[in-house]
Amino acid sequence: MLPEGAWPRLHDFGRWIARWLYRPAYRIRVVGVSNVPRSGAVVLVANHSTLIEPQVLFGMLPRRSVFLIKSELMSGVLGWLLVRIGQLPVRRGVADRAALTAAVQVLRAGGLLGVFPEGTRGSGDVDRAEQGAAWLVRTTGAVVLPVATRGTLRPSDSRRRFRPKLDVLVGAPFELTVPRGRSGLGEATEEIRKRLADLVHELDEQRAAA
């Protein structure tokens, strides 16, 4: 399921480009892609450090996906292209009803929607999370799919190596009951944050042992 105005063939072509775009610059390793449900409503939650992660995830997923993209990117030719490949603009810091309505429509039609619950780029440790993902789960009954990524940030104490490793670890999808009210939304948000943070920590341990 893609939003209204998207061009499915262009979406699929964009996925193919994203699948190969960064391979000359990174050694990309993806583990757990079999955990991605092939059908049904899915809210994918991932950590976020740079603009590279959304593109890598978009390319590696085995099904069509829609990501919530900050509205600042939706201008000019880039904005036109992002809309045509089915990505949804969202205004950060406000209750963007248009974006949420479109996201709910995607999920209720059995689509996969990608959300970066940290809300902005940072260390990617998932020390905080916004409530949008939990709200979408409560509204649509979608399952949650945690995905951890590491390797896009330049090390602070060293120069970037030639073709550094970029790792993607897809966790097991899980169902989440989100109680009514603000407190219920807060509890569910913390559960999503913790599960994603634990997956990031697991990926960090795997990278350290490699």
Image (cartoon, grey):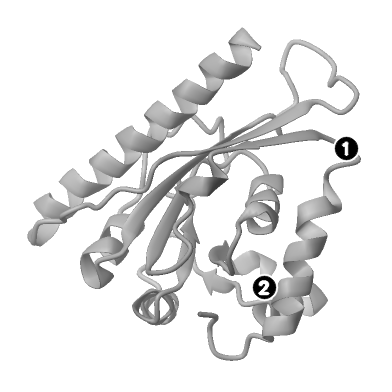
Q: Is residue 33 left or right of residue 37?
A: right
Amino acid under disc 1 = Ala
Tag 1 residue: 25
Tell me if mark 2 has few (under 14), some (14-19) or many (20+) residues whose alpha carbon lies within 10 angstroms of its own.
some
Quadrant hosting residue 108: bottom left
Of badges 1 and 2, the one in the foreground is: 1
Per the rendering, the mark at residue 100 is none
- The residue under the point 73% across, 19% down is 155
Residue 210 versus residue 151 in the image, above or below: above
Tag 2 residue: 74
Residue 79 versus residue 149 in the image, above or below: below
- The residue under the point 66% across, 79% down is 83
SS state under label 1: loop
Amino acid under disc 2 = Met
Q: Disc 1 to disc 2, how far (Cα)?
A: 26 Å
Can residue 120 be seen? no
SS state under label 2: loop
Q: Is residue 107 left or right of residue 83?
A: left
Q: Is residue 151 left or right of residue 16?
A: left
User: How far across and down, in percent of the image, does residue 169 sit?
Assistant: 55, 35
Q: Is residue 182 left or right of residue 144?
A: left
Question: Along the polypeptide, which appears first: circle 1 or circle 2?
Answer: 1
User: How far across and down, in percent of the image, does residue 149 sit?
Assistant: 59, 36
User: How far across and down, in percent of the image, does residue 186 sit?
Assistant: 19, 48
- The residue under the point 54% across, 19% down is 204
Quadrant hosting residue 78: bottom right
Residue 131 versus residue 2 in the image, above or below: above
User: How far across and down, in percent of the image, does residue 172 sit?
Assistant: 39, 42
Can residue 188 be seen? yes
Q: Where does the C terminus fall, quadrant-wise? A: top right
- The residue under the point 58% across, 64% down is 69
Marks 1 & 2, CB-CB < 8 Å contact: no
